[in-house]
Amino acid sequence: EVQLLESGGGLVQPGGSLRLSCVASGLTFRITALSWVRRAPGRGLEWISAISHDATDTYYADSVKGRFTVSRDNSKNTMYLQMNGLRAEDTATYYCATHYVDSSGYSMSYFGYWGQGTLVTVSS
Amino acid sequence: EIVLTQSPATLSVSPGERATLSCRASQSVSTYLAWYQQKPGQTPRLLIYDASNRATGIPARFRGSGSGTDFTLTISSLEPEDFALYYCQHRFNWPNTFGPGTRVDVK
């Protein structure tokens, strides 16, 4: 059974930093591309970052580009999101999600497995 | 950035009826579009990928169609567990984006 577990959320002041972690089990992590998706209170889903299986490619939403950095450690089955310069509008539940692999083994940036999320609150 | 709009915002349907949800892209996304279902307190569930392919384990009553800029999710006969929030999402380019969602509730 695939499991994703996020951690690292909490209350932080505007301008502060947090590092989120996502630990995966039940899958071959080193061949799995992943993304971070967030949902702000009362709002919809927002994709914010993706990382390829080997970390050679990373992608960001305009809303976080230059402030957030995604990385991974395949030896620890863990993906990270370093969040700097946090703003009130970054307040959200942050989910990690695996990219979907179809029956032919093709990976695409749709999100098949999701963690339960970690809440980040940016407030003074 | 490609903007996805969904309509209607809320759809009121009786159990057993058909529900038709729409997603429109600000530019062509070819068939690179997915649909998700999210229930309160749960994580999103992938229903349809690449416009018309059901994800693993998704019942046949969920059908996706469309290409280019206009897409439809049809639920042929609503079951009680289908009342939820539905999102579309594209993967045509980066950044991937989601639509704002359509809530399907009980009429």
Image (cartoon, coloured by chain):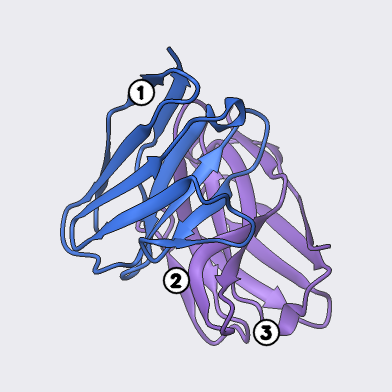
Chain colours: A purple, B blue
Q: Residue at x 45, y 38 (%)?
A: B86
Residue A59 tag number: 2
Q: Are marks 1 and 3 in contact (CB under 8 Å)?
A: no
- Residue at (61% x, 62% y) in the render: B56
The answer to whether residue B37 is above or below residue B32 is above
Task: Please name the residue that numbered disc 1 is placed on.
Answer: B11
For the residues beneath circles 1 and 2, the answer to whether they share a chain is: no
Q: Evaluate if marks 1 and 2 touch, with contact meaning CB atoms under 8 Å apart.
A: no
- Residue at 63% across, 50% down: A95
**Residue located at (58% from left, 53% from top):** B58
Res. B21 visible in picture? yes
| Chain to which the residue tagged by mark 2 belongs | A
**Secondary structure type for disc 2:** strand
Q: CA distance from mark 1 to mark 2?
A: 34 Å
Q: Is residue A119 left or right of residue B17?
A: right
Ranked by sequence position, the earlier of labels 2 and 3 is: 3
Determine the CA span between mark 2 and mark 3. Answer: 17 Å
The spot of residue A47 in percent (x, y) is 46, 54
For this view, does B98 lie left or right of residue A42?
left
Type of amino acid under label 2: Tyr
Name the amino acid type tagged 1: Leu
- Residue B12, quarter of picture: top left
Residue with the mark numbered 3: A31
Q: Nearer the viewer, residue B7 or A13?
A: B7
| Mark 3 surroundings within 10 Å by alpha-carbon count, few (fewer than 14), some (14 through 19), many (20 or more) | few
Residue A17 appears anywhere in the view: no
